[in-house]
Amino acid sequence: MAMDKQAGELRNAFIKQRFSNYYQQADIPGPTQLVQREFGVITERGGMWRHLGFKDLRELQNFLKKQVPIHAYHSSTYYTKPNARTMDEKGWLGADLVFDLDADHLDGTEDMTFEEMLAEVKVEFHKLLDSYLLGDFGFDEKDILIVFSGGRGYHAHVRDERVLQLNSHERREIVDFITRTQADIDHLVIKDIFDSKVFQGHVSSKYIYRLHPVETPGWKGKVTYSVIDFLNRTEELEKAEVLGELMHYKGIGETLAKQIYKSLYEGNPGNRGLDKIRDDLNLEPFSSDKVRNSFINYIVKEMSVDLGGETDEPVTSDIKRLIRLPGTLHGKSSLRVIPMNLEELKDFEPLRDAVWDGFTKDTVKVSANSDAEIKLRGKSFKVSKDNVYDLPEYAALHFVCQKKCDIII
């Protein structure tokens, strides 16, 4: 126990010293309308210290230099008295609409490396921005702050005046629209009766299913656009590639994927299922209702954004939420929490661009207490349990923050 305590103290001291170097030099930008925001921090002593308010940016920056937080947050909410001790006393004025995408909670990332996780969550984040925030909802790019969280994901802060007064229920409806995972076939496509029979007083009907025109508002038009886009994109691919893409969706196994493929791609050009769908939006080429519905469900899943299930969806609907403060450091990774615009996001690589230049290449001796690997600044580092390593400061700091390594003095 004494050894564990000593290792923890050395680890905390190492982190605090390096983080202190950062905060002494960093120019933390501070959020918009800073004086109306609540702030909270976690220091090496542990526990959340919140209900903090600052009169200006300089006071905030001086606080960070003095306290050297391991984690720092600000409220998505605007208050009349942000440093009041109770929510009623704070005086709620409104709140940004904040989205938090975390790779930890995306399907299929369990066996990925940190680098692969960050690439996967960036794809989802672009989908959120392009298809929904800038697309369906029509927010202006200038009203959206993009932030790399410093950990495993990204935040989007929507500061359009139209969202500030939305209540939790209204924000929840926005989340539900974006995260739709199951297709209500009768709602998303056109269902026309082409034959009806009456037997012993009961009506039996047969239907023709068609896609809505692509310009139809909401999910109906989105489904049509995505179906056509999928067909255009996959038409020239090898069969194995298409099957692999379809089977990436948990609801489609090999047998069902082959049935979808046969319904869409087999036959002579001009008379294939995909040709008929593109020509008149008719969904009849599918061999059965199950095959058709599985394909539409796949399309809906690909269109929706995974906000992390029960873990991160409440971030958006919570009107009193604390979110990471841009410009600070993430205490579990040592990476910077970086604000950026859409253009900067395109070429942004977290494990290259979020490592502070002030963390040096000077070597630090560490002992690994578990197996771990990471790629930082384009260089790969790998440690194995119970082995000792001399690592550059920036890599040692990352492993120490993750408690994968301990400092040796």
Image (cartoon, rainbow, N blue to C red):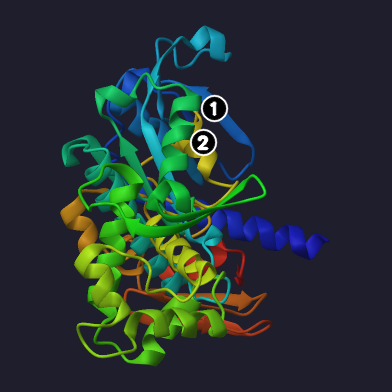
Q: Secondary structure at mark 1?
A: strand
Q: Nearer the viewer, residue 138 or 54?
A: 138
Q: Look at label 1 and name its amino acid.
A: Arg
Which quadrant holds the C terminus?
A: bottom right
First in sequence: mark 1 vs mark 2: 2
Is 233 drawn above or below residue 54 in the view shown? below
What residue sits 67% from the left and 82% below the top? Answer: 385
Residue 392 in percent (x, y) is at 42, 75
Q: Quadrant of residue 370?
A: bottom right
- Say whether marks 1 and 2 touch (CB < 8 Å): yes
- Look at the image and tell me whether residue 391 can be seen: no
Residue to which mark 2 is pinned: 41
Q: Nearer the viewer, residue 181 or 104?
A: 181
Q: Nearer the viewer, residue 27 or 170?
A: 170
Residue to which mark 1 is pinned: 50
Which quadrant holds the N terminus?
A: bottom right
Q: Residues within 10 Å of mark 1 (few under 14, many from 20)?
A: some
Q: Quadrant of residue 9?
A: bottom right
What residue sits 59% from the left and 54% below the top? Answer: 12
Q: Secondary structure at mark 2?
A: strand
In the image, taking residue 366 as reference, residue 81 lies left or right, namely: left
Mark 1 to mark 2 CA distance (whole Å)? 6 Å
